[in-house]
Image (spheres, grey):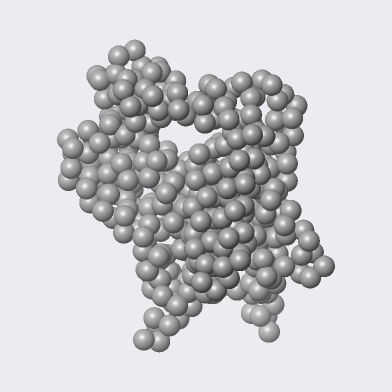
Amino acid sequence: MGILVQNEWRNRAIFATIILMLASLFVSRALLSISLIAFIVLATLHSQVYTQLKQFLASPLLISISLLFFIPFISGLWSEDKQEWGKVLLVKLPFLLLPIAFAGQWRLKEKEWKIIAYSFLLFATLACCWSIGQYLLDMQSINESYLRAKTIPTPLDDDHVRFSWLVCLAAITIVLLWDKFPGKYRGVRLALLIIPVVYLHILSARTGLLMLYVFGLAFAFYKAKRKPGISLLVTGGLIIFLLIGWFCFPTFQNRVKYNLYDLSFVIKNKYMSGTSDGNRLVSLKAGWEIIKENPLLGVGAGDLKSETDQWYDAHVTGIKETDKLYPSSEWIVYGGMAGWPGMILFTMIVFLPLCVKNIPHRFFWNLLHAIAIMGFLVETSLETQYGVFIYGFFVLWWWKWFGVCREISSMKRD
């Protein structure tokens, strides 16, 4: 009886810390760290921790996510800058601790998982409204700033790339819950879908918009055979939102104009300081050259930044320190850390979840990973605290929520 009470108390505490993590994600980096630590402590420090570690080792998915920590960890063996290596590991540490925490036998009720999802939707909606409020306070100045690669102020410390990814996940989540919404609140679900969709067009961060349109087109294709009416409605809706974005949102127009201006320098292979795509392209060249010079082991997680900076200094005349970007692709980053083995292993890690068998909500599970992979191609989301948390937590949250974690017990029976 005592064990049951203890487990029930721990489950409730875990449920509360998950809500707290999602809330703090939008408001405070420090609070996110504190709530994350609290969740990991609650989920791992108990008498059955040894069994939990065995369950962690029995799951290919959990082990693969932990490798996102172990690749830079092992590469530190040939890094000279141990201080920078330590900073990288601190950012990546949730990739080790979160899978272990989610491997535990703790279970939440379906109602509690839905409350977590509804809470996330509420937090994301409020965050979008706050950001739009900041825009309305200074529309003219912000509209003009979009011609200089600036965006609307956003939560996540103005990290508009990661925030747009998060808002897209909110749109996907509301569609996932569409038929499960409580009856008297079903009118709310349309607002919870429209707000993030409209917001992403106002924000006009390419990463989030592209993710949204990939999801929308994939959903339309998914419904084409069984519900062609919904498929046509979604496709038409996407076209309408594009037109609304162009004719009604100055931020959207100016973003397109700036991207075309930026692209003109990329096409001419001409570097222009301060341009978004120009800086990204140069960073990719830097990372690729580092991989070519160190194909077997890379330069190590601790030395990748300094090696990239040295390449900039040697090959780009007059570059500003603020323009010296990390190689803007996770494939290039992991290749720079650990050479071709690192790139190959990273590819296996991010595609492995798509191979999980007998998973409920297969379409949404696959889209969760597909849009993440898209982002990894051109962004370094896994080199930031917010990006590490978003990817690690959402994958493991849905893994536990959908019941994919039963793969552990089924493997043990086999």
Q: Quadrant of residue 129?
A: top right
Q: Residue furthest top?
A: 318
Q: Quadrant of residue 306?
A: top left
> Looking at the image, is 404 positioned above or below residue 296?
below
Q: Position of residue 178 (x, y in %)?
A: 67, 66
> Looking at the image, is 29 positioned above or below residue 273?
below
Q: Position of residue 315 (x, y in %)?
A: 25, 20
Q: Residue furthest right?
A: 184
Residue nearest the viewer, comparing 45 with 78: 78
Q: Position of residue 49 (x, y in %)?
A: 49, 70
Residue nearest the viewer, comparing 309 with 17: 309
Left or right of residue 399, residue 289 in this image: left
Residue nearest the viewer, comparing 304 with 319: 319
Observer able to see residue 335: yes
Left or right of residue 256, residue 203 in this image: right
Q: Residue at x 68, y 42 (%)?
A: 128
Q: Residue at x 61, y 40 (%)?
A: 243
The quarter of the rendered structure image containing the C terminus is bottom left
Count of labels in the image: 0
Residue nearest the viewer, comparing 199 with 122: 199
Q: Position of residue 175 (x, y in %)?
A: 62, 62
> Looking at the image, is 55 positioned above or below residue 282?
below
The quarter of the rendered structure image containing the N terminus is bottom right
Q: Residue at x 61, y 21 (%)?
A: 144
Q: Residue at x 38, y 73 (%)?
A: 58
Observer able to see residue 305: no
